Image (cartoon, rainbow, N blue to C red):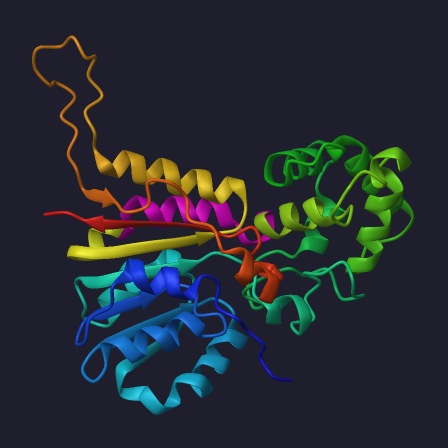
Amino acid sequence: MAYRHIPVMLNEVMAYLDCKPGKCYVDCTVGGAGHSSAILEKIKPDGLLIGIDQDADAIQNAIQVLTPDVSNVRLIHDNYVNLPNILSQLNICKVDGIIADLGLSFNQIENSGRGFSFQKSEPLDMRMDAGSGITAADIVNNETQEDLERIFKSYGEERWARKIARRIVTVRIGQRIRTSTDLAEIVCDAIPKRSLHQRRKHPATKVFMALRIAVNKELEVLESFMAGAVDFLNPGGRICFLSFHSLEDRIVKRQFKDLEGKCTCPPDFPKCVCDQKQIIRILTRKVVRPTEEEVNINPMARSACLRAAEKVG
């Protein structure tokens, strides 16, 4: 089946990355290769693109899409948190730009068969790397009611987390919860009817998002990656993040603020003693969001948040 993909905020991402011919860039989440293709056009004939994705389907698609420029591309099936090891294996010390699109791809929702969508009856998997780690079914059927409630509340900001967790534990006593539609029905049954009618999105949206985050350890991976990613940029190198929910965006915003290194001393101190060092210059003082026109064309872009920074020194 064809790999459908529309890159989110492509023009804005490319403007902030400011790709130059002959330079080296990393696409941490190749996905449908939309951003990668645009980067390649800017860095040819002598530039290098390093494309990473933990989803093997995305890598196979990228091989086909980017084949004409194979000499300019290195595709790696791995998690982007392992960027230090990846660059070391390629004998590369520094790069000129990094892009990470943290969203779920259309292909993962529609074609992966891994239960990312509550609109299809698929095995409750939700692993981006189908060859490793625990599945959503493992979590739903084995975690305690308290842990399920914590996952739904912390990662999904789900108001009815306790009721949903209690209902899941009750149902699984009689039978294992196996499919995405099984779980969606349980969630709908657990939420009070008056609240169901007030929701603009499907009632299971937040629970599915929370489980996906938990299965793939998405927030922990992002925190770990951001702690050292800028170290691999050349001076003047750019880094861009596309996030799709508030928890991710908060991590990016906070890390950028810390790396900006503004003095934290009280204003009445005669001399700075906090020893803050500026590592980056934030390029997006306010989060950048997709235009109304883009959202009309690609509804999956609706919640996208873009933040970008440049390494100083």
Taking 238 as reference, is 20 above or below it? Answer: below
Quarter occupied by residue 121: bottom right
Toward the viewer: 163 or 40?
40
Quarter occupied by residue 62: bottom left
Classified by dominant secondary structure, the portion drawn in magenta counts as helix
Q: Image point 70% across, 45% down: which residue?
A: 207
Farthest residue to the top: give it. Answer: 268
Residue 43, given in percent of the width and then of the height, sits at 23, 76
Count the labels in the image.
0
Residues in magenta?
Answer: 214-229
| Residue 239 in view, yes or no | yes
Q: Image point 77% across, 50% down: which residue?
A: 202
Farthest residue to the front: give it. Answer: 293
| Residue 170 in view, yes or no | no
Residue 6, given in percent of the width and then of the height, sits at 53, 71
Q: Image point 35% across, 91% down: which residue?
A: 68
In the rendered structure, the answer to whether residue 42 lies left or right of residue 200 reads left
Toward the viewer: 124 or 144?
124
In the rendered structure, the answer to whether residue 313 lies left or right of residue 266 reads left
Residue 221 colored in magenta in the image: yes
Toward the viewer: 259 or 220?
259
Taking 54 as reference, is 261 above or below it? Answer: above
Residue 81, given in percent of the width and then of the height, sits at 38, 56
In the rendered structure, the answer to whether residue 158 lies left or right of residue 232 reads right
Q: Image point 40% across, 70% down: which residue?
A: 35
Residue 271, given in percent of the width and then of the height, sits at 7, 15
Residue 154 colored in magenta in the image: no
Quadrant for the N terminus, please.
bottom right
